[in-house]
């Protein structure tokens, strides 16, 4: 007896579904344990990673508090036992805490008048490629500042010229040392424009700008603070206008 087309299609679908169930059952029997192990291993790895992140955050918070306390005590002159605590923080896995501790340790040597030791400590930070560039730049600036009188002017320029860029974060300090070195090298034409730029930069501390204005004036460059000049001009005009005629 022939099967009707509709019944034939239904029969084929049932056979196909049964075959797929058998294949799936065979696949799970053969590979199910390995798949389950892989899923469990993945979950364990994820949990471990999340725990590691949590512990890193906890340790960073604790180290940050310890660093803040150490710096506060240093500012208050409480230095007993402080070096060992700073040295321990300098081994932190947190880059910011480690760099800050290393810079603080070098600063303590400079404060103790150990110029050679301080310069070497700053140099280690400046040469440490595992640290972010800003930390290394600060270290190079401080190293050069404490060695400034003993260095040849050309060496100062070679070190700091990349940092003596108008608009850059280190322009004030680096620019001033580079400009002074140019003067010592007998190149006032290179020093004067730097002093003028420093004097005009309103974002820099007034002490640096004031020295730069004086040096620029000595070198024949008019670096008068334009904002002050404008204020004085406006005040003069107001006085003239209010004066009786």
Image (cartoon, helix red, strand yellow):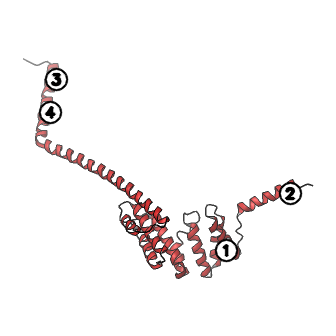
Badge nearest the viewer, 1 or 3 = 1
Residue at 60% x, 76% y is 180
Cα–Cα gap, marks 4 and 3: 17 Å
Question: Residue 212 at x, y = what percent?
Answer: 65, 71
Cα–Cα gap, marks 1 and 4: 89 Å
Cα–Cα gap, marks 3 and 2: 107 Å
As drawn, is 220 to the left or to the right of 35?
right
Residue identified by numbered label 2: 240
As drawn, is 46 to the left or to the right of 9?
right
Residue 38 visible somewhere in the drawing: yes
Residue identified by numbered label 4: 20
Cα–Cα gap, marks 1 and 3: 99 Å
Determine whether the residue tagged by mark 3 lies in a helix, strand or loop. helix
Badge nearest the viewer, 2 or 4 = 2
As drawn, is 167 to the left or to the right of 240?
left
Badge 1, how many Cα within 10 Å: few under 14, some, many 20+? many
């Amino acid at each position: 007896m022939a099967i009707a087309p509709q019944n034939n299609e239904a029969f084929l679908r049932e056979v196909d579904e049964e075959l797929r169930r058998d294949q799936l059952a065979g696949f799970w029997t053969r590979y199910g344990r390995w798949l389950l192990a892989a899923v469990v291993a993945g979950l364990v790895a994820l949990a471990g990673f999340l725990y590691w992140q949590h512990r890193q955050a906890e340790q960073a918070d604790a180290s940050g508090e310890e660093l803040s306390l150490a710096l506060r005590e240093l500012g208050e002159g409480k230095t007993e036992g402080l070096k060992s605590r700073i040295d321990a923080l300098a081994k932190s896995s947190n880059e910011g805490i480690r760099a800050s501790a290393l810079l603080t340790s070098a600063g303590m040597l400079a404060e103790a008048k150990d110029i050679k030791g301080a310069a070497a400590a700053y140099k280690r930070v400046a040469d440490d490629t595992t640290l972010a560039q800003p930390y290394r730049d600060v270290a190079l600036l401080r190293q050069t500042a404490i060695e400034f009188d003993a260095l040849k002017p050309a060496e100062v320029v070679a070190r700091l010229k990349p940092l003596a860029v108008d608009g850059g974060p280190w322009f004030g300090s680096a620019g001033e040392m580079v400009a002074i070195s140019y003067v010592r090298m007998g190149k006032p034409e290179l020093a004067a424009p730097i002093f003028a730029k420093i004097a005009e930069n309103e974002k820099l501390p007034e002490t640096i700008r004031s020295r730069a204005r004086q040096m620029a004036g000595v070198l024949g460059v008019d670096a008068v603070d334009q904002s002050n000049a404008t204020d004085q001009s406006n005040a003069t005009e107001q006085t003239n206008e209010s004066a009786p005629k």
